[in-house]
Structure formats: structure tokens, C-alpha cells
């Protein structure tokens, strides 16, 4: 799954020391500056916030409910477009207000698991 699948969580991982649960958003396309791509990322951010804050996460994963939460956007491109950077800052603020860490990780193409 990828950010194109707005209604789903792409992947959930638990840190080696089991203190943090990270929800991954996968963007397997290069950033093009397209508003449709930005909209998909924002939709995904909203899905993750609702999943974490609306009780679905705790209901589906009760064993992880008390862990520290983080969300990471995994992408193949360094975000550089000003409007995308602004969107990511907004996302960071939304997650931070809910006690959730947000980060962006650039990995080589082909290492994302989203598929096309």
C-alpha cells in the first residue's frame, strides 16, 4: 500500500526495544509538485491521525496501545517543493499536537514496498 491508498495504514513496525510503534506511509513515486500527490499525502496524514486518535489503533492492536507512537513518511525523493515542504510542516504540527513524532525518510527507489 502507498499514499495513493488513502484509507489504509501502509505498515506498522515496533522498535527493537519495543518502546515505540511506528506507522509507515509509503510514497514510491518521485515528488513532482503535483497537487494531486500533495492531496493524497494530506489525506493519508488525516487517515493516520484518525486511526491513532479515534481508537481504532488501540482496538486493533491493544498490545501496542501504550507504546510511544511515531509516523514516518518513507519516500524515494527528498521533498524540496515549497508547497510540499509546507504540507509536511503542517503534518508535523498535527502529529506533534497529539504527542506523535513525525519524520521523513528517503530511501533508494525499489526499497519501498508499495508497488505501483
Image (tube, rainbow, N blue to C red):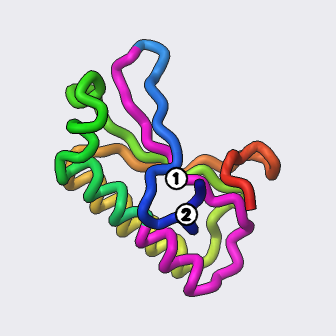
Q: Are marks 1 and 2 in contact (CB under 8 Å)?
A: yes
Residue 59 falls left or right of residue 43: left
* Residues rendered magenta in the picture: 18-43
| Placement of 38 over or under 48, stated as above or below | below
Q: Is residue 20 left or right of residue 4?
A: left
At 50% across and 45% down in the image, what residue appears?
24
Quadrant of the rendered image containing residue 28 = bottom right
Secondary structure of the residue carrying tag 1 is: strand
Q: Earlier in the sequence, mark 1 or mark 2?
A: 2
Pointer 2: residues within 10 angstroms few (<14), some, or many (20+)? many
Q: Which picture quadrant has residue 99?
A: top left
Q: Is 24 colored magenta in this rendering?
A: yes
Say above or below: 36 vs 25: below
Q: Which residue is mark 2?
A: 3
Report the front residue among 112 and 87. 112
Residue shown at 33% from the left, 65% from the top = 46
Q: Nearer the viewer, residue 74 or 60?
A: 60
Q: Is residue 56 above or below residue 27?
A: above
Residue identifier under label 1: 25
Amino acid at each position: 500500500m502507498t499514499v495513493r491508498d488513502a484509507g489504509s495504514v501502509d505498515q506498522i513496525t515496533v522498535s527493537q526495544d519495543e518502546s515505540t510503534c511506528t506507522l509507515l506511509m509509503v510514497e514510491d513515486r518521485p515528488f513532482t509538485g503535483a497537487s494531486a500527490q500533495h492531496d493524497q499525502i494530506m489525506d493519508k496524514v488525516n487517515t493516520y491521525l484518525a486511526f491513532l486518535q479515534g481508537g481504532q489503533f488501540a482496538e486493533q492492536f491493544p498490545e501496542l496501545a501504550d507504546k510511544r507512537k511515531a509516523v514516518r513518511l518513507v519516500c524515494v525523493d527528498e521533498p524540496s517543493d515549497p508547497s510540499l515542504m509546507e504540507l509536511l510542516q503542517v503534518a508535523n504540527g498535527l502529529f506533534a499536537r497529539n504527542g506523535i513524532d513525525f519524520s521523513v525518510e528517503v530511501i533508494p527507489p525499489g526499497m519501498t514496498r508499495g508497488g505501483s
